[in-house]
Image (spheres, grey):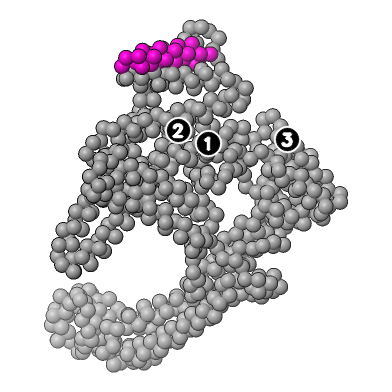
Amino acid sequence: MAIVEMKRLTLLAVRQDEKKLLRAMQHMGCVDISRMDEEELQPFASEPAADEAETEQLLNRLTWTISQMSSYNRQKAPFMGNIPEAPKADTDWVEQHPDEMRAMLDAAEELERRAGEDKGRLARLQTAADALTPWLELDIPAEKLTDSKLVCQFTGTVESRGLSTLEAGLSELPAALNIVNTVRETTCIWLAAHQSVRGEVLGLLRDAGFTPVRFQEGEGTPRQQRAKLEQEMVEVRADQEGIRQEWQQLSENLTRCKIWYDMLGIERQRQLARDRAVGTKDVFLMKGWVPAEQAEAVAEKLRSLSETASVTVEDPQEGEEPPVALRNNRVVTPFENVVEGFAMPQYRSMDPTAAMAPFYALLFGMMLSDAGYGLVMAIAIPLLIWLKQPGKNSRKLLGLLFFSAIATVLCGAVYDTWFGFNPMKDLLHMKPILDPINDPMPTMIVCLGVGVIHLFAGLGCGAYQNIKRGKPLDAVYDQLSWVLVISGAIMLLGGGLIAEIGKWMAIAGVALIILFAGREKKNPFSRLIGGLGALYGATSWISDILSYMRLFGMGLATGVIGMVINMLVGMVFQNGIIGIILGSVVFVGAHLFNLGINALGAYVHSCRLQYIEFFGKFYEEGGVPFRPLQYNTRYVRFGAVD
């Protein structure tokens, strides 16, 4: 239950052994390769990998191709990170047919190009067909809508409100007007007139708001031209259907594409690790971190793969900050999610997970506070893990919720709340241990008491860190002093001898704070001012303790909502068999909603109490997570992959 001890691993080897050494480290999955600092980089010239750009390009192309294929071949999504095992037959095929895989990408991109062309062509044809729609009643072929020596022709639209004026003006001229169609406020017309009156006709058309129309180049009437366009659209849609069928056929290779993506991803991880090394054309130097218990085994494995390799394992030097990995037992490990969700601790500090875990579960249980809800979670979560086999991170989260559910059952039993019912009170006529609804004061006191213990545990962690670093007096000055002040202040409420003892405890704590909180300052006056300033921190302790009233408020809300649900369901039950059926559905659905929304609130606020109140008393954040070179995949799981 601590931060994993790390060793510095240094590897110097010939360039020709680089790939197999990286493969070995990736297979072992326990070496975090570090980036060299500027001083280490100076003696070497970096040798960039030539194949990195190609791998990156292939990954980008595959990402797009997989996305397109997934719309035609809908595979079952992994449940909570439980990605499937890669089929060996498909894995072998991908390894043996790299050219066919690249050809598959080319085919997908060609289909996309064709689909784009068809989409653009279809849009143009549709626009042209729509433009012809108002002119379908014009039975004059487009090639004959031209002027002759004696006759001039005009085809276009005029404003409908000016049509009567146009007709009146044309009535006295050698001209013929044909109204083809009317669309909203415009009228489609064809007009023929003698060339001798062309100017007068143009004037009349201008006054009527005439807009000329040019039909698509070609022959035939507008109806014939539209029929031709519609035939072309049929052909384009047929080609689109063919493209969809080709995509459907191509998408049968989706699994192989996913396997290839993860294979390339594994190769890309090695390339990124190689970028962190330095070297020349013939040799390279690489440094990293490895857990202490695995360091010698890793070194021996690397030496066995390269006879000329120099592998050294050393303790971290002063000032070095190794990456941080947490290690706890099976019960505590799920609560690492809470620590990792905040910030990793510094390497030379402490892992707070074990100290935090029981408090997290208890705080969660006091906020959810319904034993029935906790029982549902405690049964459902193991079944979910057994049936669905979620991924590692999801399993940790479910484990956290499982232990929190156990605490919820215990807290709910203390509150006598089971799905909003109170069986101890209603059936056994016994008073529950705590009754937040009818007798809230004891529950409030318990909530504040739990908060004080939680905060004292944080001070205890801080004292442990000081003692571990050989500074036991700092534990007295910085942690024990506040325990005396807060404990003494609480004991003053007890009266009598307890209050007298509490008074002297508080005085002793205040004296320690005033005299030693500013001990790093040499000037006695500055030291005293620093101590008084630290004593002012007592106000923050009051707000921290009062923060735990949320345990009472959220627990009360869960119980009250459950009771209201039961009252409403009871009213529905009074309406015969239909009421019983409907009420049962409402009972299950409403309580599931109450469980979900309050479990979410309990999770969030439990984290908040850890991050702000508990961690605030001792936590030293800033550690870099341990990220070893390993098989990180997105779609499938592999064994050893070269």
Q: Are marks 1 and 2 in contact (CB under 8 Å)?
A: yes
Q: Is residue 118 visible?
A: yes
Tag 1's secondary structure?
A: loop
In front: 123, or 487?
487
- Identify residue for label 1: 352
Counting from the top left corner in percent of width and height, residue 271 is at: 69, 54
Q: Earlier in the sequence, mark 2 or mark 3?
A: 3
Whether 502 is among the magenta residues is yes
> Within 10 angstroms of label 2, few (less than 14), some, or many (20 or more) residues?
many
Identify the amino acid type marked 3. Answer: Asp
Identify the amino acid type marked 1. Answer: Pro
- The image's mark for residue 315 is 3
Identify the amino acid type marked 2. Answer: Phe
**Residue at the image position 53 percent from the left and 36 percent from the top:** 352
> Within 10 angstroms of label 3, few (less than 14), some, or many (20 or more) residues?
some
**Residue at the image position 32 percent from the left and 48 percent from the top:** 370
**How far apart are the two marked residues, 2 and 3, measured between alpha carbons?**
32 Å
Counting from the top left corner in percent of width and height, residue 577 is at: 18, 69
Q: Is residue 179 above or below residue 93?
A: below
- Identify residue for label 2: 614
Please state if 92 lies on the left or on the right of 558 as rendered.
right
Tag 3's secondary structure?
A: loop
Counting from the top left corner in percent of width and height, residue 340 is at: 52, 43
In front: 438, or 63?
438
